[in-house]
Image (cartoon, grey):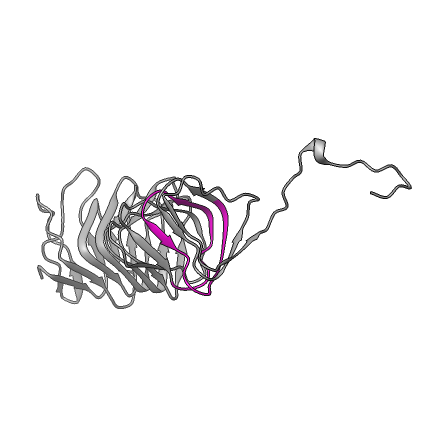
Amino acid sequence: MNNVLLLSSGTIDTGTAGTNAAIAIVGSKDGKIFTPPPLATQALPNVLFLSGGGSDTVKTKDLNCKTLGVASGTVIVPAGRLFKVNNLIINGGTIDASASNSDSIRGNVTISSGTLTAQSAANNLVVGGSWSRTGGTFTQSSATVVFNATTTGKTINTGGTPFTSVTFNGTGGGWTVTTSGMNATNFTLTNGTFNFGSGLNDTLANLTLSGGTLDFGSGTLKYGGTVLNTTGLSGITPGTAISIFTRRPVLPRHSRRRHRPGTRG
């Protein structure tokens, strides 16, 4: 059980806040899942996969494993704690991190079914790889999703679910949008190269471009503001994208013409 831990039902509890406890062995006894006494050192498996019906629940101080997969049930990350995994796969279950601190997925996030709820406080959900949502639900709450990859070849598929706040800041990183719907209320690029992809439709409300390279791709980009300030970027690839500003600029007062009744401007 050192490499793969399969839980079909029941509860995994790796200790309360302030304890460095972790699961070493979880087994079935008389048809019921049982948890051995907490250990002094952390020994979570390489792969933790929750499967089966019922209410599978993980309550943990720091959940740290290479791959966390959830097919059913619920993973709860309580207040004051966090999870750090290499890859996160959700294909039917629920991860509720609404009460947690800043969480980190060092690799890819894959959501095909089920639910991922990020922190409700103004913390970061850090992702070091690609993002793919082909089904299920992602609830961002107040967290900022931060992509910090330092290598190229990463892809972004939001599945049409907009980011409330998203930042790309990995030095040497490269991200390409693969499907329409890369929508964001607040979009920030500080490092790396971001590519809006080919033939896609995306909408961005507020853009902060303070570094990195922006590739506009060949789709249609709608901006919620009236000005796109690119002076902070290290590089720009114009592409053939169509840019649409969805708000009219407000003219300075001195440039507005006043018309008297009965006259034509």
Quarter holding the N terminus? bottom left
191 to the left or right of 46? right
| 96 in magenta | no
The structure residue drawn at horizontal position 70% and vertical position 32%, both measured from the top left corner, is 253
Identify which residue is drawn at 22% across, 49% down: 84
Q: Residue furthest right?
A: 262
Residue 73 percent coordinates (x, y) = 30, 61
**Quadrant holding the C terminus:** top right
Residue 189's spot in the image, x, y percent? 38, 45
Q: Nearer the viewer, residue 87 or 154?
A: 154
Q: Nearer the viewer, residue 23 or 124?
A: 124
The quadrant in which residue 208 appears is: top left
Residue at left 24%, top 55%?
Answer: 107
Residue nearest the observer in this picture, 65 or 159:
159
Magenta-drawn segment: 178-206
Residue 86 in the image: above or below residue 119: below
The quarter holding residue 119 reads: top left
